Image (spheres, rainbow, N blue to C red):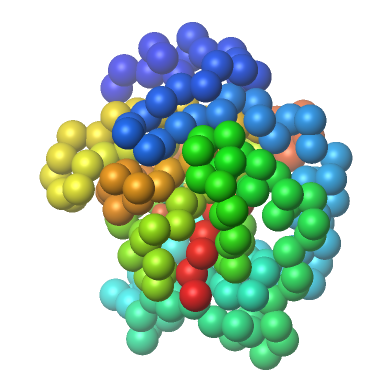
Amino acid sequence: MNLDLFDSLEPNDRRQQQLGQHAFVLRGFAISHMTELLSALESIWQAAPFRHLTTPGGLRMSVALTNCDQLGWTSDRNGYRYTATDPDSGHPWPAIPAPLLHLAQTAAAQAGFDDFAPDACLVNRYEPGTKLSMHQDKNEQDFKAPIVSVSLGIPALFLFGGHARTDKAERVPLFHGDVVVWGGADRLRYHGVLPLKEARHPLLGRQRINFTFRKAG
Ligand code: MD3
Ligand code: FE
């Protein structure tokens, strides 16, 4: 496996990298908001704890997840879908903390997507060894809105594929504070995350947190 790029990039590199026609990595974009982000994260998991869901095929996902905002992504033996309430508690998902919404909107605008109005915020938690298989995000009603993702904690190698599952994927390292925005022609591209390497982050320990903001409804 060639990890040269992964090893040679600095964690808080501030370059803006274009991955596709409408896909951008904003290096370190979330760093200046970190205190608010970490307290938002804590308030979310205290109200709606991380859990490992089962796929429709009966497999336990290695990523643990929770949600905030109006709609939360969930999976069980019956399929993938968005729900207004947490199936574990029966309560609405926690409201989206204002600093999180603000970050998602300013990142989208920076990448050329004005007036982004997300209604769903998925929070994924990875530990060393956790992976996310190649997939498309297509449970949303509206593919015109972009998707914004914020990475915290230990680094990951993100796989950015094409429009067919078998298209060759580019490997993009994502570090603490990086924000990625995908929309337009790149909205339905296959993507995934390679198994995380063993590492420890000073603020988050042995974990990577990814917030994914979407317009789902
Ligand atoms: C690329 N999460 O939860 S960010 C997911 O790091 C998911 O946890 C990843 O993929 C993570 O579904 C990656 C989100 C992402 C979303 C949509 C995309 C990446 C995308 C659409 C096209 C290309
Ligand atoms: Fe995805």
Q: Is residue 62 left or right of residue 211?
A: left
At x 74% / y 72%, what residue is drawn?
A: 94
Q: Is residue 127 visible?
A: no
Q: So how many labels did they put on this image?
A: 0
**Residue 46 in the image: x percent, y percent?**
80, 67
**Residue 133 in the image: x percent, y percent?**
33, 51
* Residue 71 location, quadrant: bottom right
At x 36% / y 86%, what residue is drawn?
A: 78
**Residue 217 in the image: x percent, y percent?**
49, 75
Which corner quadrant of the figure contains ligand 2?
bottom left
Identify which residue, 30 or 80, lies in the foreground. 30
| Figure check: 75 above or below 68 | below
At x 64% / y 75%, what residue is drawn?
A: 70
* Residue 92 location, quadrant: bottom right
**Residue 85 in the image: x percent, y percent?**
63, 84
At x 64% / y 48%, what residue is drawn?
A: 105
Q: Is residue 19 left or right of residue 217?
A: left
